[in-house]
Image (cartoon, rainbow, N blue to C red):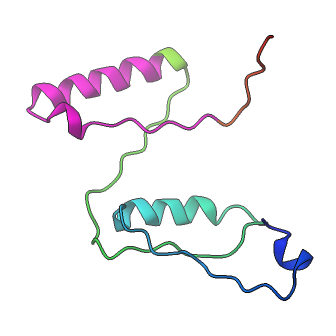
Amino acid sequence: MRGFSQEFPEAKTFKLEENFRSTAHILDASNAIIAQDPSRIPKTLYTRKGAGKPIEVLQFSYISEEADAIAAEIGRRAAAGCPWHDIAVIYRQNRLIPTVA
């Protein structure tokens, strides 16, 4: 996609920047991360939903430490009355795992 406009210079670009699901806190964080990619197609995501609740970013040194902390936090929130359907863990893996055929 990044080379599309060079390949087809007569093409028009329509940026889909409005996000209908996420809140401003989430999109602000997304925009900050995406902006680090120097070869990205420039755009800024926005929403009309308002700020929303602040996001939480956790960092761990070890996988087991991460799993324990996330499980404990989920348990704490559930015990405090947070409905299970309101709890989500978003995870992104930045490496490919080779598969063995």
Q: Nearer the viewer, residue 11 or 82?
A: 11
Left or right, 5 with reference to 27? right
Left or right, 11 with reference to 93? right
Position of residue 63 measured from the top left corner of the image (x, y, whole percent): 53, 19
Q: Going by the picture, which residue comes out furthest to the top? A: 101
Q: Going by the picture, which residue comes out furthest to the left? A: 81
Left or right, 66 with reference to 16? left
Query: Is 49 above or below relative to 88?
Result: below
Residue name at image x 50 percent, y 36 percent: 91
Q: What type of secondary structure mainly makes up the magenta span? A: helix
Residue name at image x 55 percent, y 25 percent: 61
83 inside magenta stretch: yes
Position of residue 56 measured from the top left corner of the image (x, y, whole percent): 36, 46
Q: Which residues are magenta?
A: 65-93
Residue 93 appears in which quarter of the rendering?
top right
Q: Nearer the viewer, residue 17 or 27?
A: 17
Q: Going by the picture, which residue comes out furthest to the right? A: 7
Position of residue 41 measured from the top left corner of the image (x, y, whole percent): 71, 72
Q: Nearer the viewer, residue 78 or 22?
A: 22
Residue name at image x 62 percent, y 61 percent: 34
Residue 76 appears in which quarter of the rendering?
top left
Residue name at image x 91 percent, y 75 percent: 7
Query: Is 71 above or below relative to 81?
Result: above
Query: Is 93 above or below relative to 12?
Result: above
99 inside magenta stretch: no
Q: Quadrant of the C terminus?
A: top right
Query: Is 67 above or below relative to 4?
Result: above
Position of residue 65 measured from the top left corner of the image (x, y, whole percent): 46, 18
